[in-house]
Image: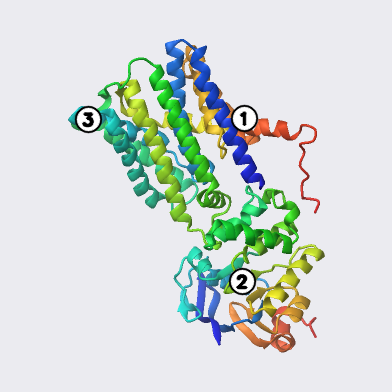
Amino acid sequence: MGNSERRLRAEFHGSLVILALVAALPLVLTSVYWQGVVIVSLYYALQAMGWNLVTGYTGQMNLAPAAFAMVGAYGVGLLSHHWGISPWLGVPVGVAAAAGIGLVLGRIVLPLQGAYVALTTLSFAEILRLVIGNSYSVTRGDLGLNVPTVFDGRLPYYYLMLAVVVLVQIALYALMRSRMGLFLQAVRDDEVAAASRGVSIVWWKTLAFVVSSAICGLAGTLYAPFAGLISPELGLILNTGLVVSMVVIGGMGTMIGPIVGALLVYTAGEMLREVGDYHLIVFALLVIVFARFFRGGIWGLLQLGADRLPGRRETGAREG
Amino acid sequence: MTFLKVKGLEKRFGGRHAVDSVHFDVAAGELVGLIGPNGSGKTTLLNMLSGHLAPDGGTVTLEGREVTRLPVHRRARAGILRMFQLTRVFDRVSTLDNLLVAGRGLGLNARDALTRARALLDELSLSPVAALDAGRLSGGQRKLLEFGTCFMVPPRIALLDEPFAAVHPSMREIMGRFVRERHALGQTFLLVSHDMPVVREMCERSVCMNAGSILADGNTEDVLNDPAVIEAYLGGEAA
């Protein structure tokens, strides 16, 4: 088993332990408010997992995860508002809409590289948010859409969101262990070399983009009935920034980083609510520090610590 | 039998012809040396053969099939596999996985790719570092690894750009032996090298480029002793 396979398995198992702790949390966390905070953290965790697939594992700087979550949420909201369709039926529609838009955007954007991908996805996200915000007759614009709830109380939402995060995590683990995971990491490390080994880079990048968009869309579809009101603010670039900071702080290109990052960053944000938006400065600084000095994020730091334990040090090959 | 046919290939960068109407053939099973001074157009030519650069004119035909417009990945699957002058491996995946990317990318199923990768790791003496990320390998090991990825599926033609440059003698020996053995079994190679003793020893035939054109093409000894080649490339030291 190679380092990459071993690392993937450790990260996956670590993430399951954390999710198991989250599952047990309501035993001690009885505050409805804080249960809501964890639900929103899990909503962001899904977006972070989707974003990590396309940016952390594939190396394509997508700046539209929040926009895809907004698409998913509006898929549920519009069906419910205009035709009275249950949010449950809206979920597959919202996911399909996000995946479909991801496919079109991916085909346009992904033959490009580097900053061009970032700029194009950022422009797309803003255009989409403005279109939704200004299409009053269809979306009610900035007034937002009411979405009927599907459960009474917080705990069913809590466990629904958690179950979806677990299922998506299992699916992502299977994906990363497959040929696709191998190819995505190859594309991330060196597109020229990947193509030279028979990997169709645009195809695999597009597929990653579609899957990522679908996951972000799924997050939005689940968030809509929980929140009860959705607005174009869901797609704000600020929310994408939050997703980015969660992944960078948790550990980009790892299975566990997005989950750890989302739980920590969102919860910390709530704890620092009294200082207003100043807490964003702290996150921004943390992102800079992690991006500059600790590329593996919190998970990478833990790994580094574990590697330095006696008996765990691995012999390097540079002397060879 | 003509295996690879290069006809009138040209590439301009601005007003300058990097490769200017190059014609040559490679027969099946040949090991052809491609030599020439720096800037003579060897790597540009290789880039056009592997699909990394679109030519401004001319055609490339492999076994009767024109591949000039095929993208890189499809050309690789057609059997034109390339080793770069500046080593290209996937730094953040293991040595074994680097080989598996090539195996799966070139159409092997998971089990066959793993079997083939393990055999190559043994043959190239890379088994001890199979689990390490490629980014942690030494320069020579990285070069060996990239070399290995070209042979996960036997290529129709292997384009090797300076495989022996800046590599420890023991690793040169491993690669050299590998090339000789595969060549004896009928593998076709195009080998770019500045290392004249290597070219002399390995290649029956050599093509010398200068200023984007072919200066000489024929028996390696004859090419290396050609006064025009000596003048353009070897500076009078070869004789």
Residue hosting label 1: A298
Q: Chain of mark 3?
A: A
Residues marked 1 and 2, same chain: no
Given the image, on which type of amino acid does mark 1 rest?
Ile
Residue B40: quarter of image = bottom right
Out of B213 and B45, give the one closest to the viewer. Answer: B45
Front position in the image: A34 or A243: A34
Residue B159 disc label: 2
**Which residue occupies 56% across, 61% down?**
A197
Q: Would you place residue A52 above or below residue A189 in this image?
A: above
Q: What residue is at 52 percent from the left and 32 percent from the top?
A: A258
* In this view, the mark in front (2 or 3): 3
Q: Which mark is residue B25?
A: none
- Residue under pointer 3: A85
For mark 3, give the secondary structure.
loop
- In percent of width and height, residue A297 lies at 61, 32
Q: Residues within 10 Å of mark 1 (few under 14, many from 20)?
A: many
